[in-house]
Image (cartoon, rainbow, N blue to C red):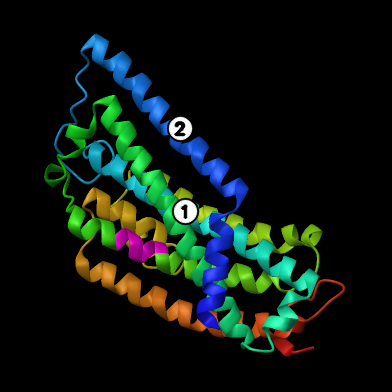
């Protein structure tokens, strides 16, 4: 049953007209932008080569900064879009009472986990399309050869790319699980914004910290501490890795803290989801859900 739910969520998101149209627009913009940039830069003979890194900041490691921004966005997009799809699906199933049928064969916690897996898997497909369009656009712009100078920017693509995927996964499960549990406390799509907005804004804070603090202060004590904090590390670590400003031991420490947080959060989110998913009528307060009332 778990596999069927995962497959259903995966297929439903891939068939979503809104997702396909938005993805097509992004891909088209990347290709058009790359083509226009290649035409303009090529005619003027502009040097698009990127200088090697001389430090760990945005000014001394421009290639690392660019790669870091792309990595942070690749972590943020699935989290935000995945939360939106998950929340809408939870409330829709609750309104149509489909969830009551599903819960006759699967436990509430398992249902939430299956929805997270299915939607997350579909988001990876769209992310792959975005990545392919970025690479193609860079090739049309003529800057792709410069992007190959990764060694001079303290970047190893064979370790960096898998690490970004890991941070994407832990960030998605942390924010997605929390968001899905809170969505189960409402019974109408109109009430979803009240519980969805705080989580979205909460996820935007670490994203902006990663984009605007880390590139200009990658080695400060504040950056070291914040990048090991739960919910912050999935955004900050990819940027620090891209700038070459973080060691392996610190990544492992942050990962362990994040996994421990997800384990604790899964207990909390599972309890809220289990006690709220069959509730109808007015929005169930979080305190009531935790107390089982």
Q: Position of residue 14 (x, y in %)?
A: 53, 56
Side of 153 where 17 appears, left or right? right
Location of residue 21 with respect to 275 vertically, above or below? above
Which residue is denoted by mark 2 in the rendering? 28
In-front residue for pair 21/192: 21
Magenta span covers which residues?
A: 163-168
Along the polypeptide, which appears first: circle 1 or circle 2?
A: 2
Which disc is residue 183 wearing?
A: none
The residue carrying pointer 2 sits among few (fewer than 14), some (14 to 19) or many (20 or more) residues within 10 Å by Cα, namely some
- Helix, strand or loop at mark 1: helix
- The residue drawn where x is 30% and y is 20% is 38
Location of residue 282 with respect to 219 vertically, above or below? below
In-front residue for pair 213/130: 130
In-front residue for pair 125/75: 125
Q: Position of residue 237 (x, y in %)?
A: 33, 59
Which residue is denoted by mark 1 in the rendering? 76
Q: Position of residue 140 (x, y in %)?
A: 29, 27
Tell which tag, 1 or 2, sits nearer the viewer: 2
Residue 109 seen in the figure: yes
Side of 89 where 2 appears, left or right? left
Residue 210 seen in the figure: no
- Helix, strand or loop at mark 2: helix
Q: Quadrant of the C terminus?
A: bottom right
Q: Is residue 78 magenta?
A: no
In-front residue for pair 43/66: 43
**Quarter-of-image position of residue 153:** top left
Location of residue 197 with respect to 110 vertically, above or below? above
Q: Is residue 166 magenta?
A: yes
- Marks 1/2: CA distance? 21 Å
């Amino acid at each position: 049953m778990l596999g069927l739910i995962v497959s259903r969520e995966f297929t439903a998101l891939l068939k979503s007209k809104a997702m396909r149209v938005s993805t097509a627009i992004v891909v088209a913009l990347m290709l058009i932008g790359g083509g226009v940039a290649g035409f303009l830069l090529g005619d003027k003979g502009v040097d698009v080569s990127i200088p090697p890194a001389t430090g760990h900041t945005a000014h001394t490691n421009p290639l690392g900064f660019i790669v870091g921004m792309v990595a942070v966005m690749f972590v943020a997009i699935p989290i935000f879009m995945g939360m939106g799809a998950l929340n809408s699906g939870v409330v829709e199933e609750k309104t149509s009472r489909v969830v009551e049928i599903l819960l006759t064969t699967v436990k509430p916690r398992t249902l939430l986990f299956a929805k997270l897996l299915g939607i997350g898997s579909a988001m990876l497909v769209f992310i792959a399309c975005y990545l392919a369009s970025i690479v193609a656009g860079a090739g049309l712009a003529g800057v792709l050869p410069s992007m190959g100078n990764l060694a001079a920017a303290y970047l190893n693509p064979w370790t960096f790319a898998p690490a970004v995927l890991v941070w994407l996964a832990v960030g998605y499960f942390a924010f997605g699980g929390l968001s899905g549990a809170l969505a189960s406390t409402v019974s109408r799509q109109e009430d979803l914004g009240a519980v969805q907005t705080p989580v979205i804004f909460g996820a935007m804070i670490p994203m902006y910290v990663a984009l605007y603090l880390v590139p200009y202060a990658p080695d400060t004590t504040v950056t070291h501490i914040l990048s090991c904090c739960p919910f912050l590390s999935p955004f900050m670590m990819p940027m620090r890795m891209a700038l070459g400003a973080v060691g392996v031991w610190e990544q492992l420490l942050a990962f362990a803290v994040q996994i421990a947080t997800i384990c604790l959060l899964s207990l909390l989110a599972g309890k809220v989801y289990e006690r709220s998913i069959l509730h109808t009528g007015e929005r169930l307060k979080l305190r009531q859900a935790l107390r089982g009332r």
